[in-house]
Amino acid sequence: MKQIKLILFVALLLVGVVACSSSGDDGTMVVTDAWGRSSPMAAQNGAFYMQITNNTGTDDKLLSATAEACEVVELHEMYMRENDMMGMRPVPGGFIPLPDGETVELKVGGLHVMCIGKIANFEVGDTYPLILQFENAGEMEVMVEIRDNADMPMDSMDHGGDMGSGDGG
């Protein structure tokens, strides 16, 4: 009988430990799949995309970004203008909200990090450091890989915008 009670106690203890440790909140901001489009130096601008998962336990915001490969970096979004034309503009409020426990996708045709005044030639396989500044999580450096536009599905390509063709977005 003592042995059964001990086994039950150990089993309950293990269940409690697993339940407490599986909250999914590891206290970090996680950035995955950071990439940018290939483009010749003739294109003045470029764009970076990624997924940002907020596991910090509190809502946060992406406030800004910097990159040595760009003169200026801004947080942008694509939007529908008049006459069913897509446009591009800085994000409202100047930041991207990152709700706790959620993943926000920066993608072609949506939210993105805009590289204005490219200093580097974005060639396939190149990598560049991108510094992200979060309101609560602080500063984080991620490496952005430049990929071939041909590797993207056609439905994810944007076809226009305020910045002109070949400028990212």
Image (spheres, helix red, strand yellow):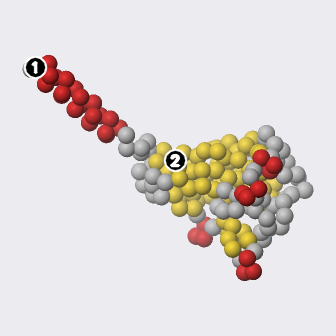
Quadrant the N terminus occupies: top left
Label at residue 2:
1
In percent of the image, x 60 and y 50: which residue is there? 51
Q: Residues within 10 Å of mark 2 (few under 14, many from 20)?
A: many
Task: Name which quarter of the figure residue 73 lies in.
Answer: bottom right
For the image, the number of numbered tags is 2
> What amino acid type should be assigned to the residue bearing mark 2?
Met
Label at residue 29:
2
Q: Is residue 76 visible?
A: no
Quadrant the C terminus occupies: bottom right
Q: Judge depth for marks 1 and 2 and give the one in front.
A: 1
In percent of the image, x 63 and y 67: which residue is there? 91
Between 40 and 156, the residue placed more toward the observer is 156
Q: Is residue 13 visible?
A: yes
Q: Residues within 10 Å of mark 1 (few under 14, many from 20)?
A: few
Q: CA distance from mark 1 to mark 2?
A: 47 Å
Between 168 and 143, the residue placed more toward the observer is 168
In percent of the image, x 70 and y 62: which residue is there? 109
Q: Tell me: 53 left or right of 146.
A: left
Q: Tell me: 103 left or right of 5.
A: right
Which mark is first along the chain, 2 or 1? Answer: 1
The image position of residue 62, as x and y in percent, is 57, 57
Between 96 and 33, the residue placed more toward the observer is 33
The image position of residue 74, as x and y in percent, is 69, 61
In percent of the image, x 64 and y 45: which residue is there? 33
Q: Tell me: 26 left or right of 97.
A: left
> Judging from the image, what secondary structure is the residue with disc 2 in?
strand
